[in-house]
Amino acid sequence: MIKTFGGKTPQVAQSAFVSEAAYVIGDVEIGEGSSIWPGVVIRGDIASIKIGKMVNVQDNSVLHADTPLVIGDNVLIGHSAVIHCERIGNNVIVGINATLLDFTQIGDFCIIGANAMVGERMRIPDRSLVLGVPARVKKELSAEQIKMVERACEHYALLAQEYKKQGF
């Protein structure tokens, strides 16, 4: 469901897939090749939300923020993640059930582990593996991990196009 709020209507790229069971409202922009799966809520009612190209937001995730939220390109957001931050860079994996709190900024080529709780105002440097509650940077990603991050959204982009073809 895509809804206007406060005079702002979500802008969705033609090649993007938004499930009919997702709820996208207000000042939201969804880039080319991105996919928004069932149960996702994206609320651009207080601040704008800009989602880049080839971003995959999996089932039951919530995106909302009190300041503008920018998500880069080639980002995979796992099931039931809560995204309430300022920035997620390019080529990032946010694990299942992870939480990113207010004013947080995630660099490029990062992995935020499943169930991680990234606290307010954290600045996560590029190429970081982040785990735990509270979340901590554990190490810099290896070249192999960087390649995995770069390929993370490919499968879902293809799957999303199949869903579009079948009229979902």
Image: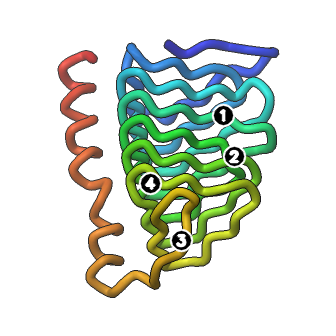
Residue under circle 2?
Answer: 69
Q: In front: mark 4 or mark 3?
A: 4
Which three-letter amino acid code belongs to the residue tagged 4?
A: Val
Residue 95 in picture, x, y percent from top left: 39, 52
Q: Residue at x 51, y 43 (%)?
A: 31
From where the camera sits, is residue 28 visible?
A: yes
Residue under circle 1?
Answer: 64
Q: Characterize the local packing of mark 3: few (<14), some (14-19) or many (20 or more) Cα atoms within 10 angstroms.
A: many
Residue under circle 4?
Answer: 94
In the rendered image, which quarter is residue 5 located in? Answer: top right
N-terminal of the pair, mark 3 or mark 2, is: 2
Is residue 149 left or right of 46 when viewed as pictured?
left
Residue under circle 3?
Answer: 108
Q: Nearer the viewer, residue 24 or 93?
A: 93
Give SS at disc 1. Answer: strand
Is residue 6 left or right of 143 when viewed as pictured?
right
Q: CA distance from mark 3 to mark 1?
A: 21 Å
